[in-house]
Image (cartoon, rainbow, N blue to C red):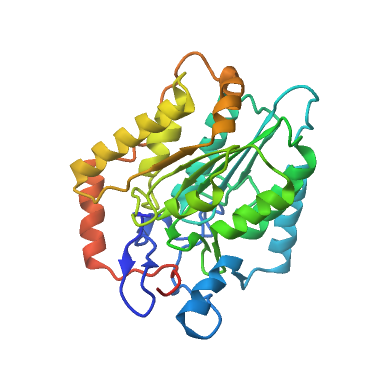
Amino acid sequence: MNRGSIIAGLLAASLAAPALSPGWAQSSANPNQPPPHTLPYPDLGSGEGRTERRTSFELSPELQRGFSAAHIRAQQRRLDAALTALAPHRPGTPDAYVLTIALDSDPVFAREAREAARVLGARYGAAGRTLTLAGPDGRQDDHPHGSITALLLALDHLGDVMDPAEDVLVLYTTSHGADVGLAYHYGDSGYGVLSPQRLKAALEEAGIKRRVLIISACYSGVFVPLLASPDTAILTAAASTRTSFGCLAENDWTFFGDALINRALRQPIALDEAAQMASRSVAEWETKARYLASLPQVSIGTEAARWLPALEASKPQLASAPVGRPAFDEAVIAAAAAKKAGKQQVGPPAAPK
């Protein structure tokens, strides 16, 4: 997402990670600094010919390399503890279960996922029913790290805890993206693509029927056709053919996250109105920055429109103030443009066309 830049070559839509800032390279002096991306993103496609290779991304390939056994065990213990701590369903009460995840180790995503959990948890009365999967962000490292595997395990567990007839999953994902799905990219050790097909299958396997899905990434509109349903409200940061912006590693927010989570959803307004407010803010910032419009997407199913008012009845009645540095800062954007022009960047590839 720039959110990253698109580079030419054999792969038609390779997404570049933001150039590294000297101040956030991993250092033993601060264990909360995330690992930077320094190596080219590996080609995760398989099969013969472009059609087969592109189709292979629907299976959501994931590669992890170089993680120590101690790291793997520590992360599994964190995830198990976080899942076990989730409060059970209350019969007769429609409960919201909030899950936020940062799939990239660029710290902007971890910061955004953490604050999104607080905002969405407060809005939907999800105290004790909120889970965050996010790595270190330069300030803290207190949650299970986000990965495709961690997300799938969390969804499977939530399927056991939730009542599909009453409860609602509120999922917020933030990462880079490509036209085949969301990019998982943790330093030089974790790589993957979460496809719309795999996310749909995971939700169906878990029996999670009622959903509010908020997907923040470039090209995130690719999730709408497959994930839309009568019982689903889905909001994305961009259309299926557009990038989104604001993912500099040192940022606290992406454009979409700042507009929707940090501003609109802090207001005592309905979800559809908040989506419209966020889209207007993003469009204004993109116009000022002279970016091609990202065109955030909204799809609210007919059944979701019926149960959303009851779910949102617990939202705070007074607006709260935004936190962190605003995503849109003309000076920062100008500096980022200059940096981008002078540096070669690397990033996760999408499938060939």
- Picture coordinates of residue 252, whole percent (x, y): 41, 42
Furthest toward the top, the residue is 317
From the viewer's perspective, is 306 left or right of 107? right
Number of numbered discs on residues = 0
Q: Residue at x 42, y 75 (%)?
A: 352
Q: In which quarter of the image is residue 47?
A: bottom right
Q: Quadrant of residue 3?
A: bottom left
Closer to the camera, 301 or 336?
301
Q: Quadrant of residue 315?
A: top right
> Quarter holding the N terminus?
bottom left
Q: Residue at x 60, y 30 (%)?
A: 121
* Depicted 127 relative to depicted 279: above or below: above
- Picture coordinates of residue 17, whole percent (x, y): 39, 62
* Depicted 222 relative to depicted 309: above or below: below
> Quarter holding the C terminus?
bottom left
Q: Residue at x 66, y 59 (%)?
A: 149
